[in-house]
Image (cartoon, helix red, strand yellow):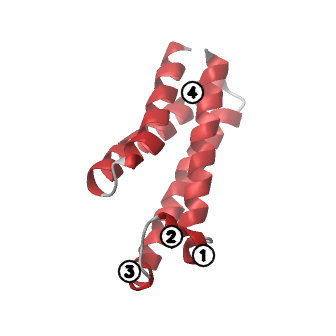
Amino acid sequence: MLLAAQIVTGIVALIHVYIVLLETVLFDSRGKRVFGLTEEAAAIVKPAMSNQGCYNGFLVAALALGLFWPDPTVTKAFAFFGLACVAVAGVWGGLTVKRSILLIQTLPAVVGLGLWWAA
């Protein structure tokens, strides 16, 4: 069960690495297309998206600590924290932005939380 929890946590972290890249360095090329923004809208929200990308980077950091910290107690705490933050952000994004966020973000995070709890 622990290995499954770690694998799912790694997948969630990789999803968020991609999101960080979309919201920051790839925003002008791929990000605005993925988020369905016109050129005008993209120009307006670009600074906010970059800031949001920074916050998603912090989620990646928490998840990485949850995978690689040497103390199992600390590892589990960071994994729970990171996955819980992703799940809450995913619910909020699903309610306020796009429903598919519930499947892309929330579902894997909730599965990961369940696996860590069972481990």
Which amino acid is tagged 2? Arg
Q: Nearer the viewer, mark 2 or mark 4?
A: 2
Q: Can you identify the residue that label 3 sits on?
A: 41
Q: Can you identify the residue that label 2 sits on?
A: 33
Of label 2 and label 4, which has the lower sequence position? Answer: 2
CA separation, marks 1 and 4? 37 Å
Q: Can you identify the residue that label 4 sits on?
A: 76
Which amino acid is tagged 4? Lys
Pick whichever, 83 or 38, lies toward us. 38
| Residue 25 left/right relative to 107 | right
Which amino acid is tagged 1? Ser
- At mark 3, the secondary structure is helix
Residue 103 percent location from the top left of the image = 42, 40
- At mark 4, the secondary structure is helix
CA separation, marks 3 and 2? 11 Å
Based on the displayed image, in which of its 4 quarters is residue 66 positioned?
Answer: top right
Pick whichever, 12 or 61, lies toward us. 12
Of label 3 and label 2, which has the lower sequence position? Answer: 2
- Circles 4 and 3: CB atoms closer than 8 Å: no
Q: Nearer the viewer, mark 4 or mark 3?
A: 3
Residue 40 percent location from the top left of the image = 40, 86
CA separation, marks 4 and 3? 40 Å
Residue 79 percent location from the top left of the image = 55, 33
| Residue 67 left/right relative to 52 | right
Q: Can you identify the residue that label 1 sits on?
A: 29
The residue drawn where x is 62% and y is 72% is 25
Characterize the local packing of mark 4: few (<14), some (14-19) or many (20 or more) Cα atoms within 10 angstroms.
many
